[in-house]
Image (cartoon, rainbow, N blue to C red):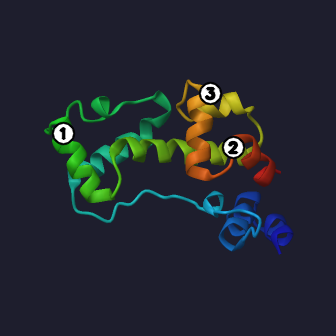
Amino acid sequence: MLHILEKYCDRSTAIYTAKVFAIDMDRAGQSYFANWSPSRAHNDELVTAAQQRMEERFQDRVTVEEVIHDLPVSRRNFIRRFKTATGITPIEYLQRIRIEAAKKLLEGKQENITGVMIQAGYEDAKAFRQLFRKIVGLSPKEYREKYAG
């Protein structure tokens, strides 16, 4: 089925389908099958503006302070509002955006892992690997081996 999807649709559709329907009995968790997408199901325009900025600038290693620089809110109030609206902190949100970008790059297999790390907005290889494993459940190398063509 996946071969047919890849042939008639594209590789990313086949990978997405594999993630949706896959069950790996040998693993304790299924987190590497998950696709995270940011939640915008809230009515806080300030948080929506911040989310958009983070999604547009995650590769630039943007910080929370840079995101809220010209927004009319204090850092503490912003973090509280952001967590209330999205369920996670701004830093966690930024990390998840970056990890999702890294996953997509790893699926493509064009870049080496260091290149993926840099394009996803990370400078520290150890921190990137640890965070990737924490969120995804696999190392970047294991993820690439599982999903790259």
Cα separation between marks 3 and 2: 12 Å
Tell me where residue 14 appears, x and y as whole percent.
75, 65
Q: Is tag 1's residue or tag 2's residue first in the polypeptide sequence?
A: 1
Residue bearing mark 2: 139
Instruction: Count residues near mark 1 (Cα–Cα under 10 Å), then give few for <14, some for 14-19, many for 20+.
Output: few
- Image quarter of residue 9: bottom right
1 or 3: tag closer to the N-terminus: 1
Q: Quadrant for residue 67, please give it.
A: top left
Query: Quick one: SS at disc 2?
Result: loop
Residue 137's x, y, as percent?
Answer: 63, 52
**Residue type at numbered disc 2:** Ser
Q: Which residue is mark 3?
A: 125
Tell which of 149 and 113 is nearer to you. Answer: 113
In the rendered image, is residue 74 in sight?
A: yes
Residue at 38% in and 41% down = 91
Q: Is residue 128 above or below residue 88?
A: above
SS class, disc 3: helix
- Residue 76 marker: 1
Q: CA distance from mark 1 to mark 3?
A: 29 Å
Residue 71 shown left or right of residue 25 in the figure: left
Left or right of 70, for residue 63: right
The residue type indicated by label 1 comes to Arg
Please report contact status of discs 1 and 3: CB closer than 8 Å, yes or no. no
Using the image, determine if residue 86 lies above or below residue 24.
above
> How many numbered discs sit on the rendered protein?
3
Q: Is residue 78 left or right of residue 116?
A: left
Residue that appears at 40% across and 30% down: 62
Q: Amino acid at mark 3?
A: Ala
